[in-house]
């Protein structure tokens, strides 16, 4: 959180020194630009960390037409198997990341296949203009994105809606703890955490959101790293490849 506080301060200061006084007093603009600064500062470390997790084996399983939610710095682009994907639409609500995403797509040889859409993942009207509609996606990829949407249950249902029957939702997310003490800590500190870390929430019940989204062929295949012997972990992860049931 120290870096996040620094990033928010540095962003507000930058706006002020540039004479952008309105922006310097606009929390949303400070949060958006500050999150980009924070993420870009820690990105090398975080990318290395992801490489040691299930993320490294999950992303290459994307195939066909892919909807990537919240690509951020574009870390996952290099992990796509180019022989499996035909088109990738990256939906990112923070415009500050657009240049990094496009740069990563070019470096990875996916410049012609990757399209960046600056919009919220819940803005279905905007997404439909880019071909993202009911039953249109072969794969939806979400790597630590559902934590930052306002309504994870509605988002999970939207993911289910845009997937083709037999389509796959590939994800790596964090969720609320099963330990009541840690859960209480997550709930109490979440307002501050969320404000500093780009809207990220540590207390979302991702299991419930996915279970209620629709009928999956393999809901029981979800894996996780929650350890009963380490109940104090505030960001327990869960991951998997869920298959939308055939009609």
Image: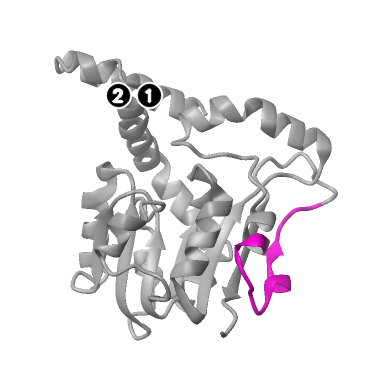
Q: Write down the residue under mark 2.
A: 11
Residue beneath the point at 75% across and 37% down: 183
In the rendered image, which quarter contains the C terminus?
A: bottom right
Residue beneath the point at 38% across and 24% down: 8
Colouring:
one colour
- Counting from the top left corner in percent of width and height, residue 202 is at 61, 40
Say the numbered circle drawn on residue 116: none
Question: Quick one: 239 or 26, which is closer to the camera?
Answer: 26
Question: Quick one: 208 or 36, which is closer to the camera?
Answer: 208
- Counting from the top left corner in percent of width and height, residue 1 is at 52, 29
- Counting from the top left corner in percent of width and height, residue 75 is at 38, 58
Q: Write down the residue under mark 1.
A: 8
Q: Is residue 143 visible?
A: yes
Q: Secondary structure at mark 2?
A: helix
Which quadrant holds residue 225?
bottom right
Depicted 58 relative to depicted 186: above or below: below
Residue beneath the point at 35% across and 28% down: 28
Where does the magenta region start and end? 212-227
Please tell me whether residue 226 belongs to the stretch shown in magenta: yes
- Report if the CB atoms under discs 1 and 2 are less than 8 Å apart: yes
Q: Secondary structure at mark 1?
A: helix
Depicted 223 relative to depicted 136: above or below: above
Question: Quick one: 211 or 141, which is closer to the camera?
Answer: 211
Q: Is residue 56 visible?
A: no
| 10 Å crowding of disc 2: few (<14), some (14-19), many (20+) | many
């Amino acid at each position: 959180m120290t870096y996040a506080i620094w990033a928010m301060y540095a962003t507000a200061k930058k706006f002020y020194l540039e004479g952008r006084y309105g922006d310097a007093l606009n929390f949303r603009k400070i949060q958006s630009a500050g999150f980009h600064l924070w993420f870009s500062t820690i990105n090398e470390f975080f990318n290395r960390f992801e490489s040691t997790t299930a993320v490294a084996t999950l992303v290459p399983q994307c195939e066909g037409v892919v909807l990537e939610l919240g690509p951020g710095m574009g870390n996952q682009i290099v992990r796509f198997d180019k022989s499996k994907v035909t088109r990738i639409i990256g939906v990112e609500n923070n415009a500050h990341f657009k240049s990094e995403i496009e740069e990563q797509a070019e470096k990875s040889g996916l410049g012609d296949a990757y399209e960046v859409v600056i919009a919220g993942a819940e803005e279905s009207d905007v997404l439909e203009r880019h071909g993202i509609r009911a039953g249109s996606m072969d794969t939806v990829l979400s790597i630590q994105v559902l934590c930052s949407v306002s309504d994870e249950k509605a988002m999970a249902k939207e993911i289910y809606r845009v997937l083709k029957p037999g389509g796959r939702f590939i994800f790596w997310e964090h969720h609320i703890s099963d330990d009541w003490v840690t859960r209480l800590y997550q709930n109490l500190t979440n307002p501050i955490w969320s404000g500093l870390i780009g809207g990220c929430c540590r207390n979302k019940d991702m299991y419930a959101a996915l279970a209620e989204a629709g009928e999956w062929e393999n809901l029981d295949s979800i894996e996780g790293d929650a350890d009963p012997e380490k109940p104090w972990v505030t960001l327990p992860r869960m991951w998997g490849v869920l298959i939308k049931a055939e009609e």
